[in-house]
Amino acid sequence: MSLLQDDFGRKFQYLRMSVTDVCNFKCSYCLPDGYRPDGKPKFLNLNEIENLISAFAKVGTRKVRITGGEPTLRKDFTDIVRLVADHQDIRTVATTTNGYRLAQHAKEWYDAGLRRINVSVDSLDPRMFYQITGENKFDEVMRGIDAALEAGFERVKVNAVLLKDLNDKDLPAFLNWIKGTPIDLRFIELMETGLGHDYFKAHHLAGADIRAQLLQSGWSKDISSSEDGPAQNFSHPDYQGRIGLIMPYEQNFCASCNRLRVSAKGKLHLCLFTESGVDLRDLLQSPEQQGELIERLHQQLHNKKETHYLHQGVTGVTQHLASIGG
């Protein structure tokens, strides 16, 4: 079965699968007013997820990241992890979480087959953490990171969106933290979405500025691997942790794109920004539909654009990143 590839020669072995768009945090750059349901949501069930993963595995998907919203809000989250991990062709099962349930469940999720975890921590100052997330759960999240390290995850990453005039002063504290802690710290450049023009204008901090600071402080850029995708990773001989930069406004950011997205309601998104998605759900009801589903995936990849056009001021139709899993 031929691998998923677009018209620009990019191969897609990484699926970001959202399982809910519900989130219990109110992060100022994503869901400042909190989650607002549109009627009673009907997210993909376990049977639909099984059929989705089986099809993607057949066309070369080797890594699946379970996303949201906040994916661990699903009562069957552990079952979803186990279902994905049980596919022999899926080599890596990961998730991105706000970490509020991590302290209690890290070992359970690891035992189910989860191997990599990204935890969102936008500040190491509890007051700033509360200001950005709208939740007073800093200590809880940090205990969760400790639990993940103890559980034996292959890789624990911490995601932080650096924001001018908010948490940008936290950079020294973040660096001091990873000096003796073996985590990958990911700084994500703020991206403008449909609802966030004024916020973006007030708080955008260029990732290139952070890179310049790192290089001046003795950090060196790692040799890129196919797993990195668009991330630029940096190491320092005096630090146990590493730093990754996600800089969507960087020239050629999309050249190394290796991921596709499926929303919690079963829509395929070829890009985080540029289109409203293609429904797959009608082909997720039975294993007998797998051939047709795979054909639709191949057909849709002809529509993938060469770039997201963010650097030209195009924000696309995505209103907030929680809606399709970031």
Image (cartoon, rainbow, N blue to C red):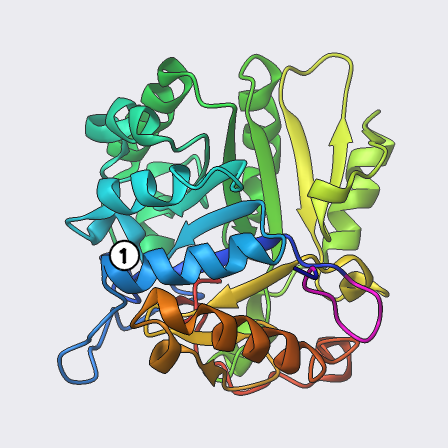
- Left/right of residue 310 with respect to residue 83 in the rendered view: right
The picture places residue 266, in percent across and down from the top left corner, at 37, 73
For the residue pair 224 and 321, the one nearer the viewer reads as 224
Q: Inspect the image, locate mark 1, and give the three-letter code of the amino acid beneath it.
A: Phe
The picture places residue 147, in percent across and down from the top left corner, at 32, 20
Residue at x 21%, y 84% (from the top left corner): 38
Residue at x 13%, y 79% (from the top left corner): 40
Rendered position, 87 above or below 164: above
The picture places residue 18, in percent across and down from the top left corner, at 38, 61
- Left/right of residue 11 with respect to residue 203 in the rendered view: right
- Left/right of residue 261 with respect to residue 128 in the rendered view: right
| Residue 105 in view in this figure | yes
Residue at x 47%, y 49% (from the top left corner): 65
- Left/right of residue 180 with respect to residue 40 in the rendered view: right
Residue at x 55%, y 29% (from the top left corner): 173
* Number of dots carrying numbers: 1
For the residue pair 210 and 225, the one nearer the viewer reads as 225
* Secondary element at tag 1: loop
The magenta stretch is 3-10
The answer to which image quadrant residue 299 occupies is: bottom right
Magenta highlight on residue 9: yes
The answer to which image quadrant residue 51 occupies is: bottom left
The picture places residue 72, in percent across and down from the top left corner, at 26, 47
For the residue pair 124 and 107, the one nearer the viewer reads as 107
Residue holding disc 1: 25
> Mostly what secondary structure, the magenta segment?
loop
| Position of the N terminus by quadrant | bottom right
Magenta highlight on residue 5: yes
